[in-house]
Image (tube, grey):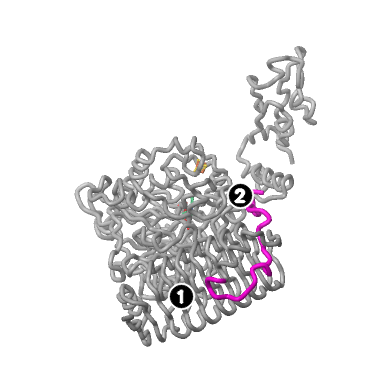
Amino acid sequence: MAHAPTVLDAEGKDLRAASTELKGLLGKDAVIVKNAAHLHGLCGGLKSGGITIEGNSGDYLGVLNSGALIKVTGNSGKYVADNMTSGVVFVNGDADYGAAQYCYGGTVVVKGDAGDFTATMNKGATIVIGGDVGAEAATYMVGGDVIILGNAGENLGNYLIRGNIYIQGAWDSLGHNCTVGELDAEDVHKLGALLDEYGIAADAKAFRKITPLSDKPFYSH
Amino acid sequence: MTTVGAFCVTLNRDQCINARMPGKCATCAEVCPYGVFSLNGGNEVVVQNYNVCVGCRLCAEFCPENAIRINPAESELVSRYPWTLGTVEEIHHKALTGSYMLRGFGATGQTPHFDGIVVVPSQLASPAPRDKYREECNMEVVIGEDTCESPIRLQYPFLFPAMSYGALSKEAKLALAIAAAKTGIMTNTGEGGVVEEEPYYATGYEKAGRKRRIWEPGGYLVVQWSTGRWGVSADYLNAGDAVEVKIGQGAKPGMGGHLLGDKVTEDIAAIRGIPVGSDALSPCRYYDVLELEDIKKQVEFLRDITNYEKPILMKLGPSRPYEDVKAAALAGVDAISIDGLVGGTGCSPEVVTQGVGIPTIAVIGPAVRALKDLGLHRKVKLFALGGVRGGLDAYKAMAMGADGVGFGSAAQIAMGCRGCMACHQGNCPYGITSQNPKMRERLDPEEIGQRLANFINASAEELKILTMLSGHSDVRELSEEDLRALDVNTAAITGLKLVGYERALPWWENGHGK
Ligand SMILES: Cc1cc2nc3c(=O)[nH]c(=O)nc-3n(C[C@H](O)[C@H](O)[C@H](O)COP(=O)(O)O)c2cc1C
Ligand code: SF4
């Protein structure tokens, strides 16, 4: 018989108390955390486990995630999945400023919109934004894939060094060192599989692809 | 006005074409409009009249064999300042290339520094001197004693500051780790990720998982958390004994780390997650910090990710030391390093290194006052960086209230560096700041680690001598009363008593400066 998930009520707890309790529960079943919007940096550096944040989260949720599956049923605060290296972070609502920055790996899915400077300095993660992203998304990205189903703000992909931005909607302006192209068969296959996996209804062929012009746009021309 | 005999003209006859083949070349005689060179009866170039040389160096520029040297007869700082040869060459470089100058090392030239301060020895009116040869002197500094489960206990009040793998070679990084282990101090990854051997070398072990140290007493490794986040993961943060949050550094405050593509080898590219040969230019600020409160949140989650075991440190550039140190302490860190104008670097724009930031002796006082005003002086440890050359500078910084000092450039020099300032080009002939395998071969980590350890031990002895001759047996007893400023400028900047006057300058005395 399946166990009911373990519930951690974070109300009135500080990061140290809530995090210590959470780490103690992770060996068991999936954990649901309630009333965690005041906690910043919760689920930091976890190597495994499945955690659902019921409602909204604070800032830096899942920072340095190293393998856990973290879901937020509401909206996430600023810098969700910051510097993640592996695992999955899934936000059912919107993500505030700076979602999925500095990630080396793993997957971040935001069903709704994401704020400015999303996916900045992405170094290898797959980052899917179901709605629109703000300005400066994927700034100084050096690897990985960013998939945007909606529109993007100004300066998209500024100083892109490596990696791909797939976008279905429009953008206000492109940043330096970007070029726009069409998807090849491999891109369509990769994107299609990803959209299927996260239950996102979209046609992979309808996307355009933004890639870097040069991987040395600063001093070493 | 042209001075007679202002320049010495040297012609290297071994290189000169005309000296080997009279009648040939003689370009110098042709291009010099002042008649410095001429041809004698045998068609040989001679220095006819060096007194008329104006130092335009046109002859040297045209000489196909680089056989001519023109040197000022007296220091250019006297005869041509502010249009010294360096300035002239810099303007030429910009005019020819359209790019500004980059270089390694810190600010050079005359800025207020430790040399404007002297140590006051003990005689009758103060506690008697201690005997360096037969009495003990406590130099230990503990970081995170009340806040962390694994505090750091430095045997000496010294550290090797952040110097990244990339800026430094792997061999130099390992030499620093070995020296830290041999002297019980800490070394720092810098912002380029961790070299595999660094964590166990720094703590004194030859191999991971070994139970017996080969380098006693064992030191510590600080891992740096910075704006480029190169090679950073939860495992990286837990690989060291402390985490340092970098806000800035003295050589380029307000700018991020610079690692030019020439130094980005396959290994470094893999650690940093960037293409081989591309420039790694760290952002000047954290993309994931919008307000001061976010820094506080970062300190909290760094503690959480390191299981509340390891001290969290912060590194500041020289900006507004009182306010910055206050903000850093309020963010909840266990120690703060503050770098001064002279602080070294592996690569920075020349104008930034040379002209941006507050001198080290001017940041220490305000930093100490900030901690005192918060009741945190000696609890949150303060390390002064930037131009610290040995035990004498360390003593002065500590008597001004710092808990310890860091040796960056001095450590490079202890490894063999001669201060050529070309670190950014990646061809360091001593293998210190080079990624070229041929140059790196020249640096044996164990041998150079021992040189670094010797330097640290000697500097510690110097600090001990000075501490004891001024009547103390613990470096924590040092105070401003142990120092005097040698000139009005230094007294005005530091608030120290002026020699001869034996008081602080009036505006310090009536409290305006404090
Ligand atoms: C080769 C080199 C690399 C450096 N890399 C870093 C770095 O990665 N992060 C950092 O905060 N500071 C870095 N610094 C600055 C030092 O940590 C330190 O602030 C400075 O060297 C202190 O001044 P000093 O050189 O006069 O002792 C570097 C300095 C040098 C010389
Ligand atoms: S000798 Fe090496 S480390 Fe020293 S300044 Fe020159 S290049 Fe830099």
Q: Does ligand 2 reach within 8 Å of label 2's beta carbon?
A: no
As drawn, A114 above or below A215: below
Q: Which element is circle 1 on?
A: loop
| Magenta part of the chain | A196-221
Q: Which mark is residue B102?
A: 2
Q: What residue type is labelled 1?
A: Leu
> How many numbered marks does the figure carry?
2
**Image quadrant in which the C terminus of chain B is located:** bottom left
Q: Position of residue B348 (x, y in %)?
A: 57, 53
Question: For the stretch drawn in magenta, what is the main secondary structure?
Answer: loop
Please name the residue shown 42% across and 66% down the image: A67
Q: Which mark is residue B225?
A: none
Q: Where is residue B323 in the image (x, y as percent from the top left)?
A: 48, 72
Task: Report whether residue A52 is seen.
Answer: yes
Q: Nearer the viewer, residue B95 or A48?
A: A48
Q: Which amino acid does label 2 sit on?
A: Leu
Mark 1 — on which chain does it sit? A
B79 drawn magenta = no
As drawn, B95 above or below A165: above
